[in-house]
Amino acid sequence: EVQLVESGGGLVQPGGSLRLSCAASGFTFSSYWMSWVRQSPAKGLEWVASIQPDGGEERYVDSVKGRFTISRDNPKNSLYLQMTNLGAQDAAIYYCAKAGSGWFEYWGQGTLVTVSS
Amino acid sequence: QAVVTQEPSLTVSPGGTITLTCGSSTGAVTGGHYPYWFQQKPGQAPRTLIYDTNNKHSWTPARFSGSLVGGKAALTLSGAQPEDEADYYCLLSYNQVEVFGGGTKLTVL
């Protein structure tokens, strides 16, 4: 059974940083593209970033380029999102998602990021 | 960035049929946008129903189908059930940039 469990969310001050993690199980992690998608009441669902199975290619939505970094540790079956210079517009539930049959075949349950002073 | 448009809300009667649509600010939606459809119920993560226009996952109920109609992607629900009441989101791919629509709140009433 595919499982994706996000962690690392929490309250952070504007301008601060946070690192999200996604622990994957139930499939060969190193064989699949992985992504982060966020959801906020203001902006709805928004694709954030994706990373190639071997980590060689990364893709980002324009609004996070230069501030967020997606990465993965295949031996640890883990996906990460390093977020810096956070602003109110980054407050959201962050989901990790596995590609497969389609770009977002499976989703985790999400981790909440709150940006506030 | 392209804007993906959906009906904000729709209502369908139990057992009825309804079509949700997904349009693009850049023009007609084609198979090259690899349209996706997701269902989300309150307090839950989204769940993918349809990928690449009309492909279903093993968990996608047979009453859901995807297509291209009139320059838009479409999700048709035939024989609506009470459990189909949810938010539905489409997603289109634009040269390696994925853009979600604003979602359609579907009421089964």
Image (spheres, coloured by chain):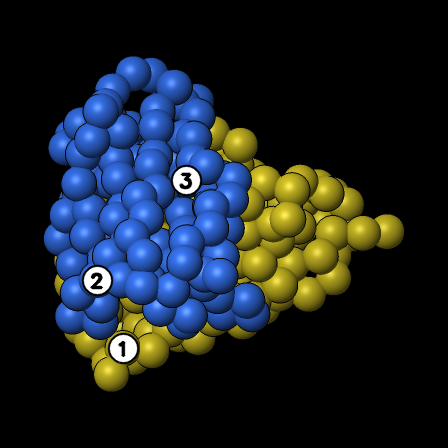
Crowd tier of the residue under label 2, counting other residues whose Cα lies within 10 Å: few below 14, some 14–19, many 20 or above:
few
Q: Nearer the viewer, mark 1 or mark 3?
A: 3
Q: Is residue A109 left or right of residue B56?
A: right
Q: Which residue is mark 3?
A: B100
How many marks the image carries: the answer is 3
Q: Chain of mark 3?
A: B
What secondary structure is found at the residue carrying circle 3?
strand
Q: Is residue A51 left or right of residue A48?
A: left
Tell me the residue at 53%/32% (across/down).
Answer: A63
Chain coloured yellow in this rendering: A
Residues marked 1 and 3 touching at CB (< 8 Å)? no
Q: Nearer the viewer, residue A2 or B15?
A: B15
Q: Dividing the image into 4 quarters, which one contains the N terminus of chain A?
A: bottom left
Chain coloured blue in this rendering: B
Q: Are marks 1 and 3 on the same chain?
A: no
Q: Which residue is mark 1?
A: A2
Q: Are marks 2 and 1 on the same chain?
A: no
Q: Amino acid at mark 1?
A: Val
Crowd tier of the residue under label 1, counting other residues whose Cα lies within 10 Å: few below 14, some 14–19, many 20 or above:
few
